[in-house]
Amino acid sequence: MAIYNFKKIIGSNLLSYLKLQGYTKTALAKMTGISRPTLNQILEGESPNPKIYEEQMQKIAETFSLPVDYFLRAPDIQQEKWQVPSTQYSDRSTSSRDPLTQELLNDLDELLTVAAYYIKG
């Protein structure tokens, strides 16, 4: 199956799955051995090489014991109240952010996701 043709949909669904399950991008990178920059490409649907993309998706699917085509559809997991962000910050700003600021905001978002996971626990 040529899942590469659906990389935008897969990236979006994979990101939703990670958030709903309480995983961070960093955790997924460590679990799969896929570098963080490459993982970001997968999640953004911008992986340039079809063969490598399919190999990486195979690793991700195996990590979660799921079929490779699982991320072609949105996850069926019901979001609990604690998983819905209560803090809003403007990530839709019309002005562009410098890369360091964006990286810090991404890291903060991951920390908040992990904290919310442990608060529920």
Image (cartoon, rainbow, N blue to C red):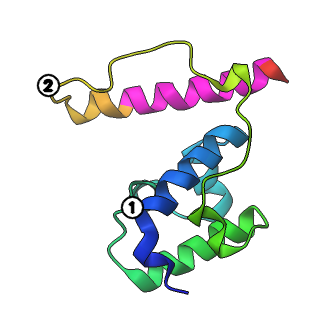
State left or right for residue 25 relative to residue 119.
left
Asked if residue 86 is positioned above or below residue 84 in the image, the reply reads: above
The three-letter amino acid code for the residue at tag 1 is Gly
State which quarter of the image contains the N terminus: bottom right
Outermost top residue: 87
State which quarter of the image contains the C terminus: top right
Q: Examine the image and state in which quarter residue 44 appears.
A: bottom left
The foreground one among 2 and 62 is 2
Q: Position of residue 80 (x, y in %)?
A: 74, 26
The residues colored magenta run 104-119
State left or right for residue 16 relative to residue 63.
left
Q: Position of residue 30 (x, y in %)?
A: 63, 55
Residue drawn where x is 44% and y is 77% of the image:
4
The three-letter amino acid code for the residue at tag 2 is Ser
The foreground one among 22 and 102 is 22
The disc at residue 95 is 2
Outermost right residue: 121
Asked if residue 39 is positioned above or below residue 66 in the image, the reply reads: above
Q: Position of residue 91 (x, y in %)?
A: 33, 25
Answer whether residue 28 is magenta in the image. Answer: no
How many numbered discs, if any?
A: 2
Dominant SS of magenta comes to: helix
The disc at residue 45 is 1
